[in-house]
Amino acid sequence: MMSSTGLRILAVTAHPDDAEIYIWGSLCAWRAMGATLGLVVASSGEAGVRKGHDAAGLGPRREAEARSAAQNIGLEPIFLRLPDGGLAQSDLLDRELASAMAAFAPTLVLTHDVQDYHPDHRAVSQALQRLASLKVPVLYVDTLAGTTFLPNVYVDTTAHISAKIEAIRRHQSQDPERFVRNATKQSVWRAYQCNAPDGHHAEAFRFDAHYPFSDIRQQLPPAPSLAPLSNFK
């Protein structure tokens, strides 16, 4: 069994608020285990212009929002500053991600699902598939509204839902309350899938076992606890 102090969890996302929306509760849970966390963001989110917001300087502003969110769990995001909306598979994307992974030396990588709705998300996921290969296991992140996603890993995020909401709200340029509502509903639903007691929250992932990574349970935070099965009688 790997000790908690040996865990090095690297999240790789396409945009500055992706980690907060999809996996922030789990990152908090890993942090509570004593894991070392890393966050790589492929773009600065400069294409995410919301109605009523100024497009000028949006990339730097979104980076600042992400840093503000991350400081509460001791994270310093690394921004690759590749084109938002244009993260097509490329040698440059591969080189930048390979360099970031080599510098951090993760024991586990988190990234978007290969069938995610957003082309930038898919491009990052496909790049990580190629780069991780036999080097490190990859855990795929839930999709928006869970569409097309079949999880087989759940993390109990009940103790960290307030931190997740606060982190999402740091992204004021993105009208964050819509993400607060949707992410909260999704975390309640994922906990319900686990038959967790009322009031619980969970985040969902998928692990595709392959040689030499057949089992990563020793690297995971606890799953939600079960509600009494007598509730179904």
Image: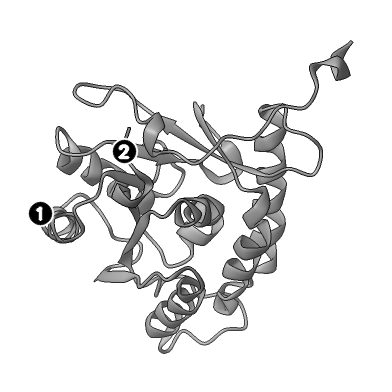
Q: Can residue 216 be seen in this view?
A: yes
* Residue 65 image point, x, y percent: 48, 79
In the rendering, which numbered label is found on residue 91?
Answer: 1
Q: Which of these two is toward me, 47 or 96?
A: 96
Crowding around mark 1 (Cα neighbors within 10 Å: few <14, some 14 to 19, many 20+) is few
Tell me if 19 is positioned left or right of 80 in this view.
right
Q: Which of these two is toward me, 196 or 1?
A: 1
Tell me if 157 is positioned left or right of 210 in this view.
right
Which of labels 2 and 1 is toward the front? 2
Q: Which quarter of the picture shows residue 43? A: bottom left
* Residue 26 image point, x, y percent: 51, 49
Crowding around mark 2 (Cα neighbors within 10 Å: few <14, some 14 to 19, many 20+) is few
The N terminus lies in quadrant: top left
Q: Name the residue under label 2.
A: 2
Q: Which of these two is toward me, 58 or 226?
A: 226
Q: How far apart are marks 2 and 1 (CA)?
A: 34 Å
| Tally of marks | 2
Q: Which quarter of the picture shows residue 15? A: bottom left
Q: Which residue is drawn at 35% across and 70% down?
A: 77
Name, please, the residue furthest toward the top. Answer: 233
Tell me if 200 is positioned left or right of 82 in this view.
right
Element under disc 1: helix
Q: Which quarter of the picture shows residue 44? A: bottom left
* Residue 63 image point, x, y percent: 40, 78
Nearest to N terminus: mark 2 or mark 1 = 2
Mark 2 near mark 1, Cβ–Cβ under 8 Å? no
Question: Where is 169 relative to 121, above or below?
Answer: below
* Residue 210 image point, x, y percent: 25, 22
Question: Where is 226 relative to 46, above or below?
Answer: above
Q: Which residue is drawn at 61% across and 77% down?
A: 51
Tell me if 27 is positioned left or right of 208 in this view.
right
